[in-house]
Amino acid sequence: MASSSPNMLTKFESKSSRAKGIAFHPKRPWILVSLHSSTIQLWDYRMGTLIDRFEEHDGPVRGIDFHKTQPLFVSGGDDYKIKVWSYQTRRCLFTLNGHLDYVRTVFFHHELPWIISSSDDQTIRIWNWQNRSLICTMTGHNHYTMCAQFHPKDDLVVSASLDQSVRVWDISGLRKKHSAPTSMTFEDQMSRANQNQADMFGNTDAVVKFVLEGHDRGVNWVAFHPTLPLIVSAGDDRLVKLWRMSETKAWEVDTCRGHFQNASGCLFHPHQDLILSVGEDKTIRVWDLNKRTSVQSFKRENDRFWVIAAHPEINLFAAGHDNGVMVFKLERERPASAFYQNNLFFITKDKHVRSYDFQKNIESPTLLTLKKLGSPWVPPRSLSYNPAERAILVTSPADGGSYELINLPRDGSGSIDATDTKRGQGNSAVFVARNRFAVFNSGNQQIDIKDLSNSTTKTIKPPNGTTDIYFGGTGNLLLITPTAVHLYDIQQKKTVTELAVSGVKYVVWSNDGLYAALLSKHNVTIVTKALEQVSTLHETIRIKSATWDDAGVLLYSTLNHIKYTLLNGDNGIVRTLDQTVYLVRVKARSVYCLDRNAKPKLLNIDPTEYRFKLALVKRNYEEMLQIIKNSSLVGQSIISYLQKKGYPEIALQFVQDPQTRFELAIECGNLDVAVEMAKQLDKPKLWSRLTTEALAHGNHQIVEMAYQKLRQFDKLSFLYLSTGDKDKLTRMAKIAEHRGDFTARFQNALYLGDVQDRIQMFKEIDLYPLAYMTAKSNGLTEECDSILEATGLTEDQITLPDIGSPLTIPKPIVSTFKANWPTKATSQSFFEKALLGQVEGLSLEDAPAATSNGFGFDDATEEESLKRNGNLAEVDEDEDAAGWDMGDDIVPEVESDFVNVESAEAGAGSSEADLWARNSPIAADHVAGGSFETAMQLLNRQLGAVNFEPLKPRFLEIYQASKTYLPASSGLPPLINYVRRTVNETDPRKVLPIIPRDLESLAGELQSGYESMRANKLEDGARIFKGMLHALLVNAVSTASEVEEAKKLITSACEYSIAMAIELSRRKLGTPDEVAKSPEKLKRSLELSAYFTIPKLEVPHRQIALVSAMKLAYHNKNFNSALSFANRMLSNGGSAIKLLDQARKTKAQCERNPNDAHEIEFDQFAEFDICAASHTPIYSGSGFEVCAFDGSKYHSKYKGTGDPT
């Protein structure tokens, strides 16, 4: 089809006899074609398939129409009949008779149950299709009426006739007459009666409103504008005329001249200011409604056009000609767009450039307008974005193809005309680098590489027949020819590689640039960036667009679905679409796309199915488990997919149907499920399949059960023989006897070696010769004689063959009937184990799919992760962790079967943990290496430590923190990684382990100790300070300043420990009442509260101790002591005003009577320390002992005992 414009896109063509009528279905992709041959065809124009044919008319069928909402269509033909059909039941429902000549057109009313028909009998008739009656006949034309249509909204009808006129009729009277009666006033009735002038027959139902005369020959077609008061008509005078009407009159606006044969059909474009017409000059012509000039025309070689129709919703048209029908579009509706990171740049229908932010989901105002680019009816074809320059390249196919290079403004501040534009001729233009773009010109087959000032820097001759170019990775281009794609290196000016793929129209790169999808009309080919084919797939419906998920899944859209494909070619449907969209971006459960009106849309999808398949392909079992546990992923497709991929055990998780479960269980050797299902279904065929499988597994207990179900006694006997189950064999013999089954009885007797039973059986069935032989061969002479006697023969009368030695009883070498003999271990796949919760690395709760180390235990303590890691017996290498003899071993030894290859220089067979103990004299490093024995020896030598029980938690803490464990594969010990504090050290003699809870974190603990002192939570405080002392005892410092800091921490912790111990022992004396009753307790209580003020605490805390002592002393009338405490408080000062006020008041009270009622051992003027064990004073000058670690002091009598702090 030659066309004077490149833009018409044929979507479907049918071959048939002459097409006289066409109708689009309003929703489905169907088109009805009525033919000159009397057939009506129903086509699916998307699939290009003939759905149905309807043949009941005699002669040509000229009129056809779908109902807007009901499953009906109407047809009218040269047999004078109008037929109403149901396309659901595929038959004619009824026929409307009345016309006296050919029926030319038929149409349904948009809301009333009416059909309008025009006929060569010069009338227009309106029928009610619900009660199948004729309700109005409109007469007035005096030649064939060629066409009549209802107005899309008003009560008007327009008709065209060969009498050269177009008539507009008012049918409001008909509507009122046939609508439900309403209560009307007399005035209303009068005005209604007078409103419509009756025609000459007194008919007020349909009255001629206007007669439009202007055509010089017959008028073939007429149509209303969908929204404006306009009419278009086409006639045998080769003209297309445009008419306008008001309430009172109608007039001719203009004429579109161009057809050089009869114009046979015309219509208004439903969405644009265009008129389309067809004619017997074999052309389709498009006219500008406002200028009445020709915009474009398309010519067929041999076929005259007879009719044209427009789809009510979509931008589609159909034209009927001598050899069938063609469905076409006037222009591409794919909005030009490009996305970069979180922004989409696109061009709207009004040729405005806008951007859309994926994160905020907002559309920007117009950034610029491209009104000047190309022609007004031709939308831009492509857009390429350069983030470095914030520039865009836009191409338009108008006038042989042109491009514009424009810089985008930073923000959209209204419709800006592009000022700084560079333009040129070319069919495609695309950025290839930060400051270079390529322009392809198909006319002279050359590619120019240009810089941003639009000057050519290089010219390339592409392979012959190149049709398009795409970005091909930095410095490369993808050149598209009809049969291949070439990867072209711009620098070297040569094709690097090519791939034979035909008909490629679009190229979509994955986000990481490693893969590209080549889209053609019906195929998707996935290639690597080096153009190696990865996979390909075929779709019957046209593929429209594609985009990549971050996980490397390609989502593509067809006309009515969004689908996905994995790199390996596995594909499926994600969701259906009600209208065609162009995918731009996928993020999690959202798909961003542009619709045909260039409006950004966000569609929700369920990515579960393709995520699951991707996890399966990548063997990401964790994600698969996550999906199985949390989603409703079921259905035949996923089950057969899993089966096909060789994962029946996973498919088993999804299946409910017992038969399928049985099949899958057999396939993956899951006998338990298979037995369960076989019991449920209880079919012989399944039991026999189960026996075969169970035998292969060596599970003879299941085999036995199945044989019993199948009543296969002979096989059962043999099974009992081979497993050595004598009792059951005997039982089988009894059963055989009971059943009177001699063969089985003989067989069982043979298996059991029961000669007597065999002889007895032969006798019972009169086989005396065999009975005699059996007795003879087994040496039973008496039996022989009795047999001869019974038969009345003597030994001489019978001849015997040679008798060999009697048959030995077959016996199994080892009786195995007590347990199964597994010849085939049921290998549970990793997956089944995981599902049964046996793989500890996988946490099935709602743990996020991948935590920082890929397994769900970065937050867990090391010990938990050891437990989770399968066997706790796989904790460490071959180190000598001689446990402390404390009843329970902390970490069991590893039975290590493999040589450790952690560090070769360390000497044969030694691990890094051993090195730590060798490299360091510090107890903490020995603990980290697992050498607890040497650590305890060191602590004993350095500090005199003897009781290690309290240090056990600290030892464990260090030991566990210095290693991480990574499960490698199930059944093997985890990989161990040693964590060092000397990170950059390469010399194995200097590597040292990390020690948890270093000085920095202990300084934090000191603060929480202070906090508990302040909040009077002394038990907590005592525990914190004791813990700090333990942590400091087994720790490592590296610099002199750290040594000083550690000393300060030890002193503080020690002083606070003693202070809190004193106050706690005071509180343990009893309640204030109990203490008051006992003079000894009261004396001790007052002493301890006084000693509580002695340790060197921080000032605010010392004030707390003093105020507590002061109150207690004052309360118990020890005014002298109280006065001394008050004076000390006032000399300390501080910011606690309230406490100081209390001290002043108490001082004033006590100075009146500075005497103590109770004598206590507390000399306020002497210098003394407090013994940490007895909580009594150690006055200067008396002997005492000091703890080597924390410096706490003791009376000499405590020498050799443990330090309680």
Image (tube, rainbow, N blue to C red):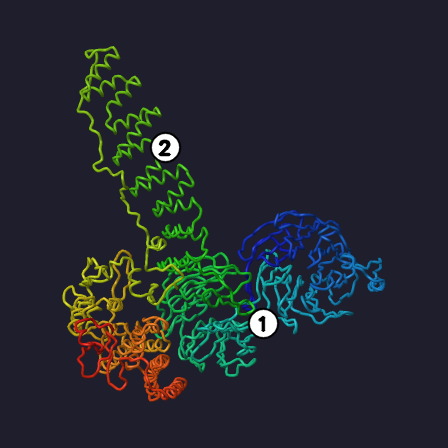
* Residue at position x 83%, y 60% in the image: 199
The image quadrant that residue 104 belongs to is: bottom right
- Please tell me which of labels 1 and 2 falls first in the chain: 1
Specify the quadrant of the image occupied by residue 450. Answer: bottom left
Residue 332 in view, yes or no: no
Which residue was labeled with disc 1? 377
For disc 1, the neighbor class at 10 Å (few under 14, some 14 to 19, many from 20) is some
Determine the secondary structure under disc 2: loop
Residue 1082, above or below 646: below
Does residue 530 sit above or below 813 in this rendering? below
Q: Quadrant of the C terminus?
A: bottom left
Q: Which residue is mark 2?
A: 711
Viewer-nearest residue: 704 or 571: 704
Where is residue 612? Give x, y as percent: 41, 58
The mark found on residue 581 in the picture is none
Name the one closer to the observer, 329 or 234: 329
> Residue 1050's x, y, as percent?
25, 78
